[in-house]
Amino acid sequence: MASSFELLFISSLLFFSHFIVSSKGQGLPPLVKGLSWTFFDSTCPNLESIVRKRLEKVFKDDIGQAAGLLRLHFHDCFVQGCDGSVMLDGSAGGPSEKTAIPNQTLRKESFKIIEDLRERVHKECGRIVSCSDIAALAARDAVVLTGGPNYVVPLGRRDGLNFATESATLDNLVPPTANTTTLLTRLATKGFDATDVVALSGAHTIGISHCTSFTERLYPNQDATMDKTFGNNLKRSCPKVDSNSTVNMDFRSPNVFDNKYYVDLMNRQGLFTSDQDLYTDKRTRRIVTSFGTDQKVFFDKFVIAMIKMGQLNVSTGRQGEIRAKCSVTNKGKLLADVVEGLDKTLAAAF
């Protein structure tokens, strides 16, 4: 009788495990060729645990790093795809994406965190996980560990061999001064509809912004679409156009991933033109309202949009490479190692 019970219990576990795996993709965007929901299940089964446990500690020490990692993933994916190119250092051939104006405010610590995660993952599993896959997992955990929805991340990305030019970076990252028409037009070329656009904008529910990203709405005259009291409070933090200070993107719950960003917009307390215009524009106002009044609706749509974004122009299979260091291509790392070796040899000789 005991043996029969054990057999039934084991059978139930096997069925339940199969159900979890087979239902991962239900209701979610289709996968691009080369990516999989279970890509590292056998070759690096502890991958997601390594990333999450480390980020739990990082965010406990500094919750602000969550927004930095989420933004890093956005800036990587929107410019020539999710290939880790934003992490590459510049070369003699020209400046990197890192130095392009829109990326100069990316947190330097974000790059260090991704590199630290890569070292931990490669130490346990070998060099089989790309920096771009690690960045995608880190972005997901940044959402989850600040209160947002948990979701599966398709994996199997390969790292790109080149970084984008500054003009390509500027062309693909929408500035905070953009209106809804610009947002919808630019993102439509990448396969996003209006709901996706509004959902992705919800990432602004965590993090900070530099004053220079929105002071054109305060000076010389305050933007008529901005709540007056909100504007006056911003002026105290940013007393002039070129103030160096920073403010919270969502003043209601700056360190919690929730739907308060949309509540801000509904109260004319959005920080950027690209934020507030989503509520001003009739094409997106209804979507903003639905997210602001129902957090679950926002979470569901955000997950769909994030999975779509995470698959933009990915390299898979034999394309690209798995970098041994996120800031340089493997060829570049080999050259750097040789130079470092020569330097050490010369130093020892003299």
Image (spheres, rainbow, N blue to C red):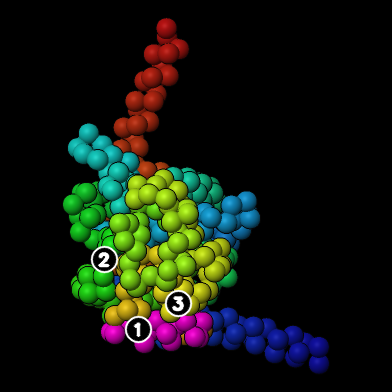
Helix, strand or loop for the magenta stretch, by majority: helix
**Mark before the other along the chain sequence, 2 or 1:** 2
Q: Relative to residue 335, is residue 124 depicted above or below?
A: below
Can you give x and y, in whole percent of width and height, for residue 156 in the image? 38, 64
Closest to the observer: 159 or 10?
A: 159
Give the mark nearer the N terminus: 2 vs 3. Answer: 2
Task: Identify residue for label 2.
Answer: 178
Quarter containing the N terminus = bottom right
Question: In 3D space, how far apart are the residues under numbered discs 1 and 3 (Cα atoms)?
Answer: 12 Å
Q: What residue type is labelled 1?
A: Arg
Tag 1 and tag 3, C-beta contact below 8 Å: no
Q: Residue at x 31, y 61 (%)?
A: 221
CA–CA distance in space, label 2 to label 3: 20 Å
Furthest-right residue in view?
1
> Marks 2 and 1, Cα distance to the nearest angstrom?
16 Å
User: Magenta residues?
Assistant: 282-295
Front residue of 183/302: it is: 183
Above or below 6: residue 264: above
Circle 2 Cα neighbour tier, 10 Å, few/some/many (<14 / 14–19 / ≥20): some
Residue 306 placed where, x, y %?
A: 39, 72
Which picture quadrant has residue 180?
Answer: bottom left
* Amino acid type, callout 2: Ala
Residue 267, disc: 3
Which residue is label 1 attached to?
285
Instruction: Name the residue nearer the viewer: 228 or 285.
Output: 228
